[in-house]
Image (spheres, rainbow, N blue to C red):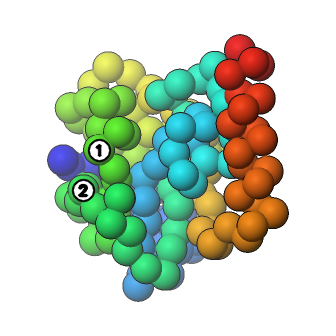
């Protein structure tokens, strides 16, 4: 899979992410292990870039890019990523799009930290509530 990182996005990411870091393109709709949401009605249209010191076996699908980023994603995310994938920076936001249009107009960058036991318990509670919210 390939993604075109536009110059404005590359410039923005250069300021935010050290060159030796791993970046995961992950769903942020409550369905990925990196999502802080417990459930969402926005399935498949909310993404985040998760920055980590280490690779992740689940997020091992490479996203070839023109910005020399160590950028990968996971199989479930590919269901929502089409041909002509592009990351741009417009109006103070990272914008992810493909040939079908804008996938997410406000992609967040999140630093990965391993969850504590309290975080895991809260996440399980949020998952249980997520099915009741929408």
Residue 101 coordinates in the image, percent (x, y)? 38, 22
Q: Residues within 10 Å of mark 1 (few under 14, many from 20)?
A: few
Q: What element does badge 2 sit on?
A: strand
- First in sequence: mark 2 or mark 1? 2
Residue at screen point 71% across, 58% down: 120
Residue 26, position in %: x, y?
A: 46, 49
Rendered image quadrant of residue 131: top right
Name the residue at the top extreme: 134
The residue nearer to you, when weighing 82 against 37, is 37
Inspect this view and state whether residue 90 appears.
no
Distance CA(mark 2)–CA(mark 1):
7 Å
Given contact means CB atoms under 8 Å apart, are the residues at marks 2 and 1 in contact?
Answer: yes
For residue 98, above or below residue 4? above
Is residue 103 depicted above or below 27 in this figure?
above
Residue 83 as seen in the image, left or right of residue 122: left
Q: Position of residue 119 (x, y in %)?
A: 76, 60
Q: In this view of the protein, can residue 1 be seen by the observer?
A: yes
Residue at image x 27%, y 25%?
A: 99
Q: For this rendering, which residue is in front, 87 or 60?
A: 60
Badge 1 marks a residue whose secondary structure is helix
Based on the displayed image, in which of its 4 quarters is residue 129 positioned? Answer: top right
Q: Horizontal placement of 70 versus 95: left or right?
A: left
- Residue at (53, 25) in percent of width and height: 43
Quarter containing the C terminus: top right
**Above-or-below relation of 86 to 34:** above
State the image quarter where residue 128 is shown. Answer: top right
In the picture of the structure, the residue carrying the numbered disc 2 is: 61
Taking 48 as reference, is 110 left or right? Answer: right
Residue 75 - label: 1
Query: Who is closer to the viewer here, 29 or 88?
Result: 29
């Amino acid at each position: 899979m390939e993604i075109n990182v536009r110059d404005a996005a590359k410039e923005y990411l250069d300021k935010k992410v050290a060159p030796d870091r791993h970046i995961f393109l992950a769903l942020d709709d409550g369905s990925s292990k990196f999502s802080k949401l417990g459930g969402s009605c926005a399935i498949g249209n909310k993404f985040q870039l998760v920055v980590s010191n280490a690779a992740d076996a689940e997020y091992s699908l490479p996203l070839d890019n023109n910005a020399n980023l160590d950028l990968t994603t996971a199989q479930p995310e590919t269901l929502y990523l089409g041909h002509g994938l592009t990351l741009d920076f417009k109006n103070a936001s990272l914008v992810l799009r493909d040939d079908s249009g804008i996938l997410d107009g406000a992609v967040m960058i999140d630093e990965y930290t391993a969850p504590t036991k309290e975080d895991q318990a809260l996440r399980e509670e949020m998952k249980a509530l997520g099915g009741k919210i929408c």
